[in-house]
C-alpha cells in the first residue's frame, strides 16, 4: 500500500499525481515558483522537486533545507545537481527553526541560538562551495577540509537563498548575516 500524507478533513491525499497536477497548473498559470516544504509531515523536498521539475517549463522550485539535518557539502552537491537538471529553476529556503519535538525526532538537540550558529556556519560553507571555491572550514559545529563541488550550478553563485529570521534577534542568538532576496 502506498503511503500518502494524511489530509485534513475534506482534503485529498497528497500523492505524486496530485503534486504533478499542482505543478502543471502553477506552471500554466504563470506562477513564479512553489515552496516544497521540509519536515516529518512532508515528502522529501529534494526528491519531490526533482520529480516535478521535468514536467514544467518555467516554474521554479523553492526547496526547503534544514541546516543541521544535512552537511553543507551534501546540500551544495544536491543544489548544483538540481539546479542543472532543472535548467536553473532552483531556489533554496533555509529553515533554521522548527518544532522542538520534530527536531529531537530528527536527532537535533540544539538550542535556538545554537541552531542559528549552525545555520551561519552552514551558509558560510555552502555559499563558498556554490561560488566554486575549495573550502577549509573549522567552525564550532561544522568542520570540512578540502570540500568542493565539481559541477557548477546554472545560476551564477548558485540558486538564490531565502531565509526567514526574526526582525530582532533574541539576545541568546548569535548574529546572522542578511541574505538579499
Image: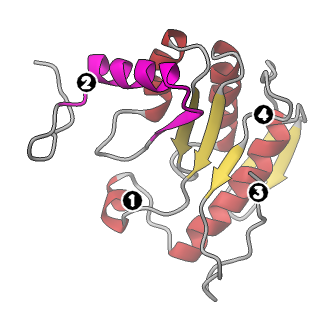
Instruction: Give the label on residue 15, or none.
Output: 2
Left or right of 28 on screen, residue 172: right
Asked where in the image residue 37 lies, by quadrant, the reply is: top left
Which residue is tagged 1? 103
Mark 4 / mark 2, whichever is N-terminal? 2
Which residue is tagged 4? 158
Furthest-top residue in view? 54
All told, the count of numbered labels is 4
Other-residue count near label 4 (Cα within 10 Å), few / some / many at <14 / 14–19 / ≥20: many
Q: Position of residue 168 (x, y in %)?
A: 65, 82
Residue 40 visible here: yes
Q: Nearer the viewer, mark 1 or mark 4?
A: 4
Left or right of 131 on screen, residue 121: left
**Magenta region:** 13-36
Which residue is tagged 3? 179
C-alpha separation, residue under disc 1 versus residue under disc 4: 27 Å
Amino acid at each position: 500500500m502506498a503511503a500518502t500524507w494524511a489530509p485534513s478533513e475534506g482534503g485529498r491525499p497528497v500523492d505524486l499525481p496530485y503534486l504533478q497536477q499542482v505543478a502543471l497548473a502553477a506552471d500554466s498559470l504563470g506562477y513564479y515558483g512553489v515552496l516544497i516544504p521540509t519536515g516529518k509531515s512532508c515528502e522529501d523536498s529534494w526528491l519531490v522537486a526533482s520529480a516535478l521539475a521535468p514536467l514544467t517549463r518555467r516554474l521554479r522550485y523553492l526547496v526547503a533545507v534544514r541546516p543541521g539535518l544535512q552537511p553543507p557539502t551534501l546540500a551544495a552537491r544536491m543544489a548544483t545537481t538540481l539546479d542543472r537538471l532543472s535548467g536553473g529553476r532552483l531556489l533554496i529556503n533555509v529553515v533554521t527553526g522548527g518544532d522542538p519535538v520534530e527536531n529531537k525526532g530528527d536527532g537535533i538537540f540544539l538550542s535556538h541560538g545554537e541552531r542559528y550558529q549552525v545555520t551561519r556556519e552552514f551558509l558560510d560553507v555552502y555559499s563558498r562551495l556554490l561560488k566554486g571555491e575549495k573550502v577549509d572550514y573549522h567552525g564550532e559545529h561544522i568542520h570540512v577540509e578540502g570540500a568542493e563541488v565539481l559541477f557548477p550550478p546554472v545560476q551564477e553563485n548558485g540558486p538564490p537563498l531565502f531565509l526567514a529570521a526574526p526582525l530582532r534577534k533574541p539576545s541568546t542568538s548569535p548574529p546572522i548575516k542578511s541574505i538579499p532576496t
